[in-house]
Image (spheres, rainbow, N blue to C red):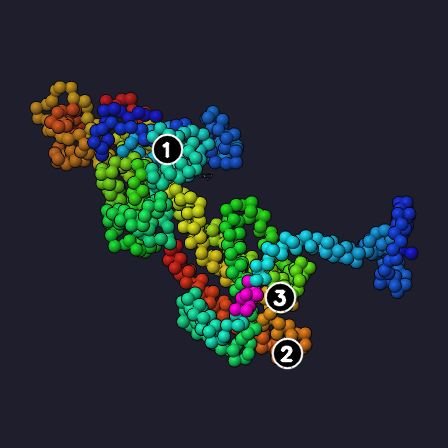
Amino acid sequence: MIETPQNVKSPHQPEIDRNVKISVRNLYKVFGDQPEAMIEFVRSGISKTELLEKYHHVLGLNDINIDMMDGEITVIMGLSGSGKSTLIRHLNRLIEPTAGEVILDGEDVLKLTETELREVRRKRMSMVFQKFALFPHRTVSENAALSLEVRGDDLGEQQSEAQYWLDRLGLSGFEDSYPYQLSGGMQQRVGIARALCAHSEVMLLDEAFSALDPIIRSQMQDLLLELQRELNKTIVFITHDLDEALKLADHLVILKDGYVIQQGEPQQILLHPSDPYIEQFVSDINRARVLRVRSVMKAYDGEVRPDAIMIDPDITLEQVIESVNGDTSKHFVVAQDDNPIGVLSMHEIMIAMVPRRASLDGLDP
Amino acid sequence: MATYTGFFDMLGLRDWCDSEKKPSLLSLRNLKGEELAWYEFPFPSLDNLHSACNAIPQTRDMTAGLETGFLTVRPALRTVLDPLTQPLSWALDGALTLFTTTPWWALVPIICFLCYRVSRSASVTVLVAVFMAFFLFTDHYTYAMQTLAIIFVCTFICVVLGVPMGILMSKSDTTQRVVTPILDMLQTLPTFVYLIPLIFLFKITEPKLYGMAIILYAIVPVVRLTNLGIRLVDQSVIEAAHAYGLDSRQRLLGVEIPLALPNIMAGVNQTIMMSLAMVVIASLVSAPGLGTLVLDGINNLRLGVGFVAGFAIVLLAILLDRVSKAALDRINSAEAKLK
Ligand SMILES: Nc1ncnc2c1ncn2[C@@H]1O[C@H](COP(=O)(O)OP(=O)(O)O)[C@@H](O)[C@H]1O
Ligand SMILES: [Mg+2]
């Protein structure tokens, strides 16, 4: 596990101190008839395949520890079957764990009574699903207002609240349509409106955009970021797509076979993959478009070349290259609010764009 | 000398055998006094053993014993079942009175209107009106209304009891495992067999006798299809309901039943058709209606009477099927789009 380096700030968020909103502690999940009996084997390091072949139990999650910060987007990424859906369903306890804790604002979700849990689900956590999971027999507006209806708010309030979010999400005029009358992208907007209507602090999105066409998908990502800038929710986002993960993540968690293989600030994971599995993921990425100046610059040591061009820490390498028309002789000084915080050369930019193998990690500056 | 006499002698049971002094009824073969041929070897059945040993009962003693046993528990069963089933008698009597005393010029339009409300189909409503005219014209109207009244009451009770039973089954695999064989049995028993225990239990003049027979037979599909319908509801929608904190009542009424409705309605349609089938047979146990005419036709070899009544039953079947199918289609087309 790699800690987020303190000097690297999230690209999307203003710098404020954040609290841990959800803390997952030593979480294990074994599927099968006698999961408790299997925990000892899992703790002693049995592999997923061995557990399946010898004991006919499926290892869903293996010793998960994640801190999800208030107001941040935590992205959980992994290939299909790596346990992403299982993990996110533990946060609102749609799945009961075999062992471990899920702490929401200091309170263990797994110890809540049924009534308390329902309250949490109604008011504090909302969820968006890969297959939308809208109620097919209800109108768009009724779907959006679900959580308000469940709480027992009065009808007028339900409608005006639903109307507000449907308008925000570009669904004006479709209030009385049924989900089947909408395209996939629009259905998922209804799914998001349903989640936003709940006014919950936490939003869980399980591959929310995976079923959508690439262009719609990109639009939805922008929409989510735009809403997030305004609403500052704690978002847990599941995806199997690294581009999507890098676009959205403040904190990136990579799952493989049910365990966390690396987690941290996404740019750091990109620059320092800890495992060949992650390298594979990372190697296909357009690094110039993803990497930001802040992640690759050298710390400012008081010396600046006289010909250095001043650049912003949060622009991407692609933007830097474009600004100097690809002139490889250039040098830059990275400045925030007119204070120099780092230096960078085109030479270093070029090197940063070549994927590095985990074994070379130590040679990094 | 019976085949097994030696066997009992050998076991030293002769005294015990002869202790029973009751004169035995002779079996058919003994009556004729035939000797056994060399290749015949009688199976040690109750009757054959009895002829060798009086203490062993004959088969007819067994059936008689069963009957006596049944008659002894009958009062106890009746004290429990009578109050429970009495409302059924009242409902049937009430409905029969209502359907037969309401003047035809009021009842026929009401029925047509209700059919329209349920089916939303003008052609089906016209069909109903034409069939009603046929019943009226051929003087089968009162009989048809009696049959219809019984079907109404029994279907209503089947739905009121069957849907909750189906819901319980869908919620628990154990309940499903226990109930399914009972439903299988109710569905496979020949319809006549239903009548036997019921005749013992209730007086033949009581409407609840045929009411029970019809309900037991016709409730099966609505239970099965309610269970199936709820189990088939899209699990991702149910998961969303859980995720947004719907409690079990909200899930049931807000999601599961609305989405299971096409299947439940298909069950109701089958229940109606099975009620009709059984109400005809139940004329054997004094159920009024078209069935009595068919019975009359059979018993007294009145071909014409039986034939016309049979035709009227076919019309009634078409009528009930069309109306309930039209209602089902309406729900289906609304739901099909939702899929
Ligand atoms: N109910 C279940 N019973 C048994 N195995 C399960 C169950 N749910 C998930 N699994 C297994 O757990 C693993 C993780 O599944 P999942 O969380 O759905 O993965 P992902 O969402 O990353 O594709 C898979 O190997 C899957 O087969
Ligand atoms: Mg999944």
Count up the numbered dots.
3
Work out how far the residue at label 1 is from the one at label 2, CA to CA, in angstroms.
Answer: 80 Å
Residue B262, position as x, y percentages in the image: 45, 58
Q: Residues within 10 Å of mark 2 (few under 14, many from 20)?
A: few
Residue at label 2?
A: B303
Residue type at mark 2: give it. Leu
Question: Of the numbered discs in the image, which one, if any, rests on residue A210?
Answer: none
Give the camera-side residue of A119 and A43: A119
Q: Chain of mark 3?
A: B
Residue B256, position as x, y percentages in the image: 44, 50
Determine if marks 1 and 2 fall on one subunit: no
Which quadrant is the C terminus of chain A positioned in? Answer: top left
Do we see residue A135 in this rendering? yes
CB of mark 1 within 8 Å of CB of mark 2? no
Do we see residue A237 in this rendering? no
Residue at label 3?
A: B282
Residue drawn at the location 63% of the way across and 62% of the way down:
B209
Which quadrant is the N terminus of chain A positioned in? Answer: top left
Give the camera-side residue of B145 and B37: B145
Q: Residues within 10 Å of mark 1 (few under 14, many from 20)?
A: many
Magenta stretch: give its range: B91-98
